[in-house]
Image (cartoon, rainbow, N blue to C red):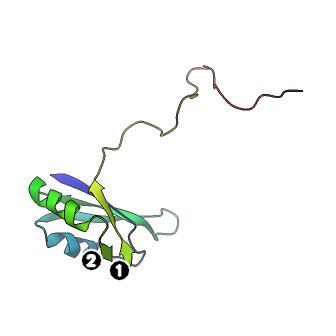
Amino acid sequence: MTTIYVGNLSFKTSEDQLQELFSEYGDVATAKIITDRETGRSRGFGFVEMNDDGEAGNAIEDLNESEFMDRSLVVNKARPKGNDSGFGGGQRRNGGSGGGGYRNRY
């Protein structure tokens, strides 16, 4: 099973429309648009799971940078969600140094 990231979606795109778009390339297990927890509105990206890796690869290749609902899609293989916070060095752990930052020169 391959999970595909789909970005730059129109905020009007439904999960059914996303599934229909990818089903042209093969069997779609799931199509999910990510929504804001507070408002329930689309965040402009989603994920599609396809059962066949070859079909998923063809969908990624063909649909990346293609036009869909007046938007240029960003389509690639999803990266696993990790524990990385996305921040560079200077993280504090157990009272360690924060590193970097502003120094008062006066």
Disc 2 residue type (three-letter): Gln
Question: Within 10 Å of the Cα at label 2, are there few (<14), some (14-19), or many (20+) other Cα atoms?
Answer: few
Decide which of tag 2 and tag 1 comes sooner along the chain.
2
- The numbered mark at residue 23 is none
Residue 35 in view (yes/no): yes
96 on left or right of 64: right
> Where residue 75 appears, x then y in whole percent?
29, 61
Q: Vertical placement of 86 versus 2: above or below?
A: above
> Where residue 90 appears, x then y in whole percent?
58, 28
Q: Nearer the viewer, residue 37 or 16?
A: 16
- The numbered mark at residue 69 is 1
Q: Nearer the viewer, residue 9 or 96?
A: 9
Q: Name the element at disc 1.
A: loop
Identity of the residue drawn at 32% across and 76% down: 68
Q: Name the element at disc 2.
A: helix
Q: Vertical placement of 16 versus 91: above or below?
A: below
Q: Which residue position is annotated with label 2?
A: 17
Q: Nearer the viewer, residue 71 or 48?
A: 71
Hey, which quadrant is residue 63 in on the image?
bottom left
63 on left or right of 70: left
> Where residue 23 appears, x then y in whole percent?
15, 71
CB atoms at circles 2 and 1 under 8 Å apart? yes
Disc 1 residue type (three-letter): Met
71 on left or right of 47: right
Q: Vertical placement of 77 versus 22: above or below?
A: above
Question: Within 10 Å of the Cα at label 1, are there few (<14), some (14-19), or many (20+) other Cα atoms?
Answer: few
Residue 34 in view (yes/no): no
Could you give the CA–CA distance between mark 2 and mark 1, rounded to whole angstroms?
Answer: 10 Å
* Residue mark closest to the camera, 2 vs 1: 1
